[in-house]
Image: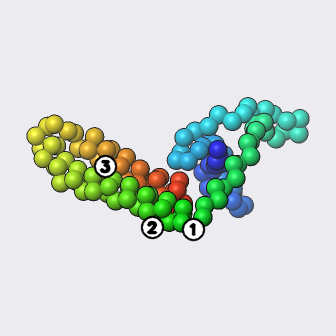
Amino acid sequence: MEVFIVLDGPPGPDAGRFVQLETHPGVSVVAGEWKRRADGFWRLGPFFTEPSPPAPDFSAGEMAQRIDRVNAACAELAREVAVRRRAYPRFVASGRLSQEKADQQLAVLEDAIALLRELSGVSR
């Protein structure tokens, strides 16, 4: 699992303060316990990590098939986004759907496209 340290500013003479530990995309993580050290500093931990699994070894043909599948899935999701973009204004106007819910559903579909590409290693 990737864990990120969030600070409220960049490094420098007036360095940022610790805000939280989080995973992608911003989910807070409880990763340990804050304890004061004898020297006056504080520590957070302990942290335990698992080794990352080895990257799959795909042949050129398998990679091409994988890219084609991801592109097909993303194209289908993009078509669904386009259909909803045309339909949602009518749904909102008729009261069948709130604007907030419409925006949320479209964002989830668009995030799904980005996540699918990210997880598969396909950048197109």
Percent across and percent down for residue 102 are: 26, 44
Residue farthest toward the right in the current orientation of the protein: 38
Residue, x 73% and y 42% (percent of image)? Answer: 50
Q: Mark 1 points at which residue?
A: 60
- In the image, what residue type sits under mark 2? Arg
Residue, x 78% and y 36% (percent of image)? Answer: 46
- Which quadrant holds residue 12? bottom right
Mark 2–mark 3 distance (CA, rounded to whole Å): 20 Å
Percent across and percent down for residue 4 are: 64, 49
- Which quadrant holds residue 72? bottom left
Tag shown at residue 36 = none
- In the image, what residue type sits under mark 1? Ala
On the question of residue 39 being in view, the answer is yes
Q: Name the residue under label 2.
A: 124
Which numbered mark, 1 or 3, is in the foreground of this view?
1
Q: Which of marks 1 and 3 is nearer the N terminus?
A: 1
Tag shown at residue 106 = 3
Percent across and percent down for residue 64 are: 50, 66
Q: Which colour scheme is used?
A: rainbow
Circle 2 sits in a helix, a strand or a loop, which is it?
loop
Q: Quadrant of the C terminus?
A: bottom left
- In the image, what residue type sits under mark 3? Leu
Mark 1–mark 3 distance (CA, rounded to whole Å): 34 Å
Q: Earlier in the sequence, mark 2 or mark 1?
A: 1
Q: In the displayed structure, does residue 32 sit left or right of residue 60?
A: right
